[in-house]
């Protein structure tokens, strides 16, 4: 078992997070807001780095999980790089002080402008997902007079046994190319004057809670690497992707430990002595985050009671998008009778539901609640739907806190919008 909440274990009553009194914090900062534990993130990074000791391996944090500049800075300072999927993420990473030589670029839809921009700053490597992209990379690198390092993203046709919307490594998914196609790319490698195609990349999905899918995918990658080396194509980099799962539901989700995960990598890639890249996102930040929210009102219904919160699907989309479970607990140590609620937000969508028929201590208006494990794909997926401003993000660190994103102002929300005054023709 991994200890996920060391930062709070001495105060396991949900009153404190990373040593910060959450009731007092919510008096300073109006809810809803996201809070992240520096200590918990550092523990995850440290644990993974320790498991990788002796390997030539770099963690490239998947920025999309949580792209807040303060989080990226924390990653950069811990020696972690970035896995980006857009030029916006590239700019954030550079802005946070991430060295370009620790940045890799993934994604099926990199535009020519994005590729050119990443070439200009000299990122470490492109994880290429289609032949068209490979040719575009070659052409743009030639124009700039540089050589791009590239890896083929292999679609290993492995079932990650995760939610369909976060499964990426089956042949029906849009990601990567088949091993047959990749073989062809390497065979024609010498035609690429400005691309050094010497890497393999695989990422089979997210929130994976067993080792088997990783092992299967890596075994396929290892066999293919062997075949390539035999054919005279050196493989200098293997990027094993991300996907390590976390605990969203206490007692039900049993994530694999970093050491066991890395042991599978070591075993599957035994005999490979090149560079390793790991791209965890969720694993590093999910359990380090909570969403603080207050009960607006308890609304009795005919069949069920609704607990209406001031947080909504625009602040945390995962329950509406993936039917994801998040543990929700009151920030209180009062003993209260248990009841059941449908826990919902104020947004005008039936999908704006955090939990159905959830057993909870009885709540009343004004109560402070904690929605747990929201550090990944929480704030990063937020929107202003229903014209709700983006919520603040607060970094906690051993009893202290720093606001790392203040609540969006109304003026910022509407900036860029204007009445249709100047009608033009094309
Ligand atoms: C999303 C993504 C990741 C991170 O996934 P997690 O499940 O958050 O670890 C890593 N690599 C690629 C290519 C991705 O698209």
Image (cartoon, rainbow, N blue to C red):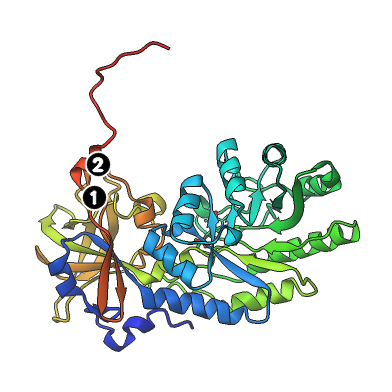
Task: Report the residue marked by disc 1.
Answer: 408
How crowded is the residue under tag 2: few (<14 C-alpha within 10 Å), some, or many (20+)?
some
Name the element at disc 2. Answer: helix
Name the element at disc 1. Answer: loop
Which sits in the foreground, 382 or 277?
277
In which quarter of the view is residue 238 placed? Answer: bottom right
Which residue is rendered at x = 17% and y = 77% of the image?
A: 332
Q: Horizontally, is 416 left or right of 222 in the view?
A: left
**CB-based contact (under 8 Å), mark 1 and mark 2:** yes
| Label drawn at residue 413 | 2
Of all residues shown, which one is farthest toward the front? 145
Where residue 46 sits in the image (x, y, percent)? 50, 79
Q: Horizontally, is 214 left or right of 35 in the view?
A: right
Where residue 325 sits in the image (x, y, percent)? 37, 62
Quadrant placement of the C terminus:
top left
Q: Horizontally, is 123 left or right of 408 in the view?
A: right
Which residue is rendered at x = 47% and y = 68% of the image?
A: 75
Distance, label 1 to label 2, CA atoms, is: 7 Å
Residue 78 visible, this angle: yes
Which sits in the foreground, 112 or 291?
112
Where residue 126 sits in the image (x, y, percent)? 64, 51
How crowded is the residue under tag 1: few (<14 C-alpha within 10 Å), some, or many (20+)?
some
Which residue is rendered at x = 29% and y = 53% of the image?
A: 315
Q: Which badge, 1 or 2, comes first in the chain's sequence?
A: 1
């Amino acid at each position: 078992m991994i200890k996920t909440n060391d930062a709070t274990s001495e105060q396991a009553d949900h009153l404190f997070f990373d040593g910060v009194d959450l009731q007092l914090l919510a008096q300073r900062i109006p809810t809803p807001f996201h809070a992240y534990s520096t200590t918990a993130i550092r523990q995850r990074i440290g644990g993974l780095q320790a498991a990788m000791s002796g390997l030539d391996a770099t963690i490239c944090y998947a920025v999309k999980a949580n792209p807040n500049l303060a989080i990226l800075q924390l990653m950069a300072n811990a020696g972690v790089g970035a896995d980006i999927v857009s030029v916006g993420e590239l700019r954030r990473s550079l802005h946070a002080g991430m060295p370009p030589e620790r940045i890799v670029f993934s994604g099926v839809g990199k535009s020519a402008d994005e590729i050119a921009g990443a070439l200009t700053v000299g990122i470490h490597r492109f994880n290429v997902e289609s032949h068209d992209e490979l040719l575009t990379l070659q052409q743009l690198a030639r124009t700039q007079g540089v050589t791009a390092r590239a890896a083929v993203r292999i679609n290993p046709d492995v079932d990650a046994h995760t939610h369909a919307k976060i499964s990426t490594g089956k042949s029906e998914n849009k990601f990567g190319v088949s091993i047959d196609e990749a073989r062809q790319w390497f065979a024609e490698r010498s035609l690429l004057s400005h691309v050094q195609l010497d890497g393999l990349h695989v990422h089979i999905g997210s929130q994976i809670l067993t080792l088997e899918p990783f092992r299967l995918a890596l075994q396929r990658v290892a066999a293919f690497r062997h075949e390539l080396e035999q054919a005279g194509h050196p493989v200098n980099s293997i990027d094993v992707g991300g996907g390590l799962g976390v605990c969203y539901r206490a007692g039900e989700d049993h994530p694999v430990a970093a050491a066991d995960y890395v042991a599978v990598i070591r075993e599957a890639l035994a005999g490979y002595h090149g560079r390793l890249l790991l791209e965890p996102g969720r694993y590093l930040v999910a359990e380090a985050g909570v969403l603080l929210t207050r009960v607006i009102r308890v609304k009795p219904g005919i069949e069920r009671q609704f607990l209406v919160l001031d947080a909504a699907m625009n602040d945390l989309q995962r329950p509406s998008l993936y039917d994801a479970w998040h543990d929700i607990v009151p920030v209180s140590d009062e003993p209260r009778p248990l009841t059941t609620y449908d826990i919902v937000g104020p947004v005008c969508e039936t999908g704006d539901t955090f939990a159905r028929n959830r057993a909870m201590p009885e709540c009343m208006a004004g109560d402070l609640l904690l929605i747990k494990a929201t550090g990944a794909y929480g704030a990063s997926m937020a929107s202003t739907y229903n014209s709700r401003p983006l919520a603040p993000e607060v970094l906690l660190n051993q009893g202290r806190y720093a606001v790392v994103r203040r609540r969006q102002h109304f003026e910022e929300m509407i900036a860029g919008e204007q009445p249709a005054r100047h009608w033009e023709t094309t």
